Amino acid sequence: MKRFIKQILKHNDMDSSQIFEQLENKNYFLVSELRIRFTEDLVDKMQRDERKSKKFLNSLRYGFIGVSSGGRNGITEITKRDRGIYRHSQRFKGSAQYEALLKDEELNDPLPVKVVAHVPSGDRMVGLYDKSGSKVVFYDVYRY
């Protein structure tokens, strides 16, 4: 698994089918095909905690599952009822880093999202989902 995570972090630009082909050596039916990217800051965080990173990466196999009703892993929309993580995403939305990410990644009308995984600490990987281009850029980890 360490080799797999290092490959992900090294390439930092793979679609979800490639990620899980390497993870399980078989093809998965994905909810949706997504182009998955990680910012350099997030890559640094992931390298420091590979165990947690593995859980987040495993949850990506479920793709974008919309608004979470609880009990499901995957990429879900951040809503107002998410309180703290919602405020975090709104603060990020007003930042220079947000504007740079929109420009660099060519994101159109992005939706704030989180990765739901079985992480007891309450950490969630957060990012922006480009509804028109079916890509996600993850930029941070937020702790509830």
Image (cartoon, grey):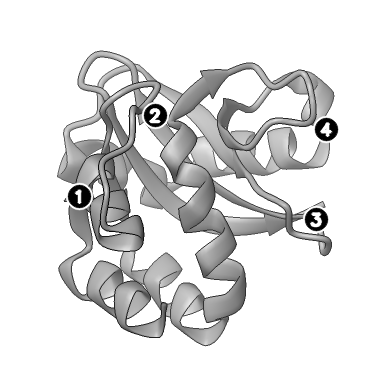
Q: Nearer the viewer, mark 2 or mark 1?
A: 1
At label 1, the amino acid type is: Gln
Viewport quadrant of the N terminus: bottom left
Query: Looking at the image, is mark 3 or mark 4 earlier in the sequence?
Result: 4
Query: Residue placed at 27% from the left, 67% from the top?
Result: 8
Q: Which residue is mark 1?
A: 18
Does residue 52 appear to the left or right of 138 in the view shown?
right
Q: Are marks 4 and 2 in contact (CB under 8 Å)?
A: no
Local crowd size for mark 1, using a 10 Å CA cut-off: few (<14), some (14–19), many (≥20): some
Q: Which residue is mark 3?
A: 122
Q: Which mark is residue 117?
A: none
**Residue 68: x %, y % from top left:** 69, 22
Query: Looking at the image, is mark 3 or mark 1 earlier in the sequence?
Result: 1
Does residue 65 appear to the left or right of 90 in the view shown?
left
How many dots with numbers? 4
Query: Residue placed at 46% from the left, 56% from the top?
Result: 57
Give me the C-alpha separation between circle 3 and circle 1: 27 Å
At label 4, the amino acid type is: Arg
Q: Which mark is residue 83?
A: 4
Give me the C-alpha separation between circle 3 and circle 4: 13 Å
Query: Residue placed at 29% from the left, 72% from the top?
Result: 9
Q: Residue furthest front?
A: 26
Query: Looking at the image, is mark 2 or mark 1 earlier in the sequence?
Result: 1
Front residue of 24 and 105: 24
Give me the C-alpha separation between circle 2 and circle 3: 21 Å
Q: Nearer the viewer, mark 3 or mark 1?
A: 1
At label 2, the amino acid type is: Tyr
Is disc 3 placed on a helix, strand or loop? loop
Query: Looking at the image, is mark 1 or mark 4 earlier in the sequence?
Result: 1
Q: Are marks 2 and 3 in contact (CB under 8 Å)?
A: no
Does residue 116 appear to the left or right of 2 in the view shown?
right
Q: Which residue is mark 2?
A: 129
